[in-house]
Structure formats: C-alpha cells, structure tokens
Image: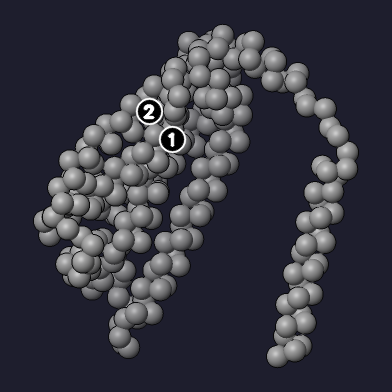
Amino acid sequence: MKAKAFWKNLQISITLILVALVLSPLLIFSFSPQTLARDYMQAHATLETGASNLVSAIYLGYRAFDTLGETIVLLVSVTGTLALLAQGYKKENTPGTENQKVSFALSPEKRKANKMRTNLMEVVSGKLGPIVLLFGFYVMLYGHISPGGGFQGGVIVASAMVFLALGNHTETQIKLNDPAILARIEAASFLILVLVSLSGILIGPHPGSTVKYSIILLNVIIGLKVGTSIGMMCIAMMGKNHND
C-alpha cells in the first residue's frame, strides 16, 4: 500500500510541476495584446462576411475550418460517451444476453419507477418543449444579426428535446426523442458540414452577401449537429431500453 501511495503522489507531483512550467511564462512575463487582427476584423468583418454579429463572422467566416474541428471534437466526445453508456448497460444484463442490442430509447419501466416524475412536470415540460424548440431555431437562423448562432441554438434545441421527453406521458416514442432518428440527423448534418467546407475550398472567396447566406446555412447545420448530439446523449442518460 505504501508503494502504491508513493507512486500516486509522485505522479501528482510531476503533473503539478509540468503545469507550473507551462503556466510560469504567463505569470512571469507580460505580453502585449495582439490588436492587429482584432482591429481588422472589427473594421471589415461586417463588410466582408455580411454578418453584423462579429462572433458569427469570425467563427463561421475567418476561422470556419477551426469550427469544423470543434464539431469533430463534439462528435468524438458524444460517440465515446454513448459507447461507455452502452458498455455499462450491457454489464447490467443477465448472463447469456451479451449479444443483445442496446437502445437508448426512454424506458417506460424506468419512467414509472421514477417518483420525481409527476403529472405537473409532464404537463409543464410538454408545453415548454415546442416553445423552446421554436426559440432554438430562431437563435440558429438569426445568429448572424443578433446574439446566438449554431452552437447556442443547438443547445437550446437539445433542451427542447429533453423537455419533450419529460413531457411525453404516453408509452409511445415520439420522433424527436428517437435516438435512431437523432443519430441519422446528426450524421447527415456532419456530412453536409464537411461538404460545405470542401466547397468553400473549391469555389473560393465570395462577396459579403454570399458569405452571409453561407453563415446562415452553417448556423443551421451546426445547430442540428449540436442539438441532436447533446439531445441524444441526454436521452441516453435519462433511461434505456433493451431490445432483442
């Protein structure tokens, strides 16, 4: 036990030393802020991209490929989370059922067993779900001229999916809470996002008005990608159902 504690403390010490070495230049030396790129984008972003929201102009215009990388990180994260949940669900099965397929649909048995699931929660959640869903699409579509965008709208859409799942008092699975359908929408959104990104390389630069419409399209695609990913993950954590 002493040897195990020693190696654990050694690993923690080495980690802290490495973190200190990486962060020490930021604490010791003073760096002047780089204002050239900031001033240029502030002066020309709206004209060159057609988006008055400078955040959307930057992450879907000047650094759109970096945003593509962020969506890949999200895809890998959600895939890994669902894989871990699936492994945990399989371990709960009785012996001899290892080959069962795992579905992340909401389980009616788990819904009935949850004492916190009340009629009031179902009614309120069911009424709020469509409103939140509509607001999420508004944030996606108008993210280029107002606060919002694809990532923000996608999170709101995922929240709407959770509300709809909580407000579904019937035993039937609605389309927006079906993990199989959400997985298809997510895959299609990611494929379209990659194709749009590649088309930008082939076609080349465009005037601001054209870029504005591409930003709207990218906001919708990213919103669907983020919304379905997070929504599917939340539904998977809320309950499960094993199908043969």
Q: Which mark is residue 74?
A: none
Q: Quadrant of residue 13?
A: bottom right
**The quadrant where residue 244 appears:** bottom left
Q: Amino acid at mark 1?
A: Gln
**Residue drawn 76% across the image and 72% down it:** 11
Residues tagged 2 and 1 counted as in contact (Cβ below 8 A): yes
Residue found at the far left of this picture: 170
Q: Residue at x 53, y 46 (%)?
A: 72
Element carrying mark 1: helix
Q: Is residue 226 above or below residue 114?
A: above
Dividing the picture into quadrants, the one containing residue 236 is: bottom left
Q: Is residue 181 visible?
A: no
Q: Residues within 10 Å of mark 2 (few under 14, many from 20)?
A: many
Mark identifier at residue 139: 2
Along the polypeptide, which appears first: circle 2 or circle 1? Answer: 2
Residue at 35%, 44% in the rendered image: 158
Of residues 51 and 68, the one drawn nearer to the viewer in this rendering? 51
| Residue of label 1 | 152
Residue in front for this viewpoint, 136 or 217:
136
Left or right: where 27 falls relative to 150:
right
Question: In the image, is residue 37 above or below residue 230?
Answer: above
Where does the image place residue 60, in percent across and percent down from the top left?
53, 27
Q: Where's residue 97, x and y in %? A: 30, 82
Residue that appears at 84% across and 48% down: 24
Residue 109 in the figure: left or right of residue 34: left
Q: Is residue 239 left or right of residue 83?
A: left
Q: Amino acid at mark 2?
A: Val
